[in-house]
């Protein structure tokens, strides 16, 4: 049993854009990843709207369910890869530019801490 052509076309579009995001993740190109992710997000939104209009017989189509399951598992794997990549980038950034880390304590002015605050009470010293 086949499902409507417009659903097939939309699902194929989502699958192709999913493949583009996977390739961009592997390549490590941030601009390609951003563009592919934007395309996938929009295609997924459009596909979601189409799915809501399906009849119950179309929703029970095993082929459609199988393809959707494969996409959902793949999207979860992509999400995990993005989280790992984010952590690695943050660790590298902290190693290269330590100032990007939040300070826990106030920074010392010199190697031995801050100089004491002068009150101005002793203007002249005599020995």
Image (cartoon, rainbow, N blue to C red):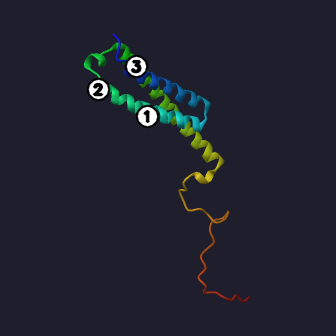
Of callouts 2 and 3, the N-terminal one: 3
Q: Which residue is labeled 3 in the image?
A: 8
Q: CA distance from mark 1 to mark 3?
A: 16 Å
Kind of element beneath mark 2: loop
Question: Which label sits on residue 27?
Answer: none
Dividing the picture into quadrants, the one containing residue 28 is top right
Figure check: 53 above or below 110: above
Question: Which label sits on residue 53?
Answer: 2
Q: Which residue is labeled 1 in the image?
A: 42
Kind of element beneath mark 1: helix
Q: Are marks 1 and 2 in contact (CB under 8 Å)?
A: no
* Residue appearing at x 39%, y 16% in the figure: 66
Q: Are marks 1 and 3 in contact (CB under 8 Å)?
A: no
Place of residue 91 in the rendered image (x, y in percent of width and height, measured from the top left) = 59, 42
Q: CA distance from mark 2 to mark 3?
A: 14 Å
Figure check: 127 above or below 117: below
**Crowding at label 1, few (<14), some or many (≥20) Cα neighbours within 10 Å?**
few
State the quadrant of the N terminus. Answer: top left
Figure check: 57 above or below 125: above
Asked if residue 105 lies left or right of residue 55, the reply is right
* Residue appearing at x 41%, y 30% in the figure: 44
């Amino acid at each position: 049993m086949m499902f409507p052509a417009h659903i097939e076309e939309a699902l194929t579009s989502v699958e192709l854009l999913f493949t583009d995001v996977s390739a961009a993740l592997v390549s490590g190109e941030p601009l390609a990843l951003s563009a592919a992710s934007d395309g996938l997000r929009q295609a997924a939104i459009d596909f979601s709207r189409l799915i809501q209009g399906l009849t119950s017989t179309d929703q029970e189509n095993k082929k459609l369910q199988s393809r959707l399951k494969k996409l959902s598992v793949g999207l979860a794997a992509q999400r995990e890869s993005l989280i790992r990549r984010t952590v690695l980038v943050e660790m590298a950034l902290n190693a290269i530019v330590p100032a990007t880390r939040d300070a826990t304590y106030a920074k010392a002015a010199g190697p031995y801490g801050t100089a004491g605050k002068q009150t101005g009470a002793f203007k002249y010293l005599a020995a």
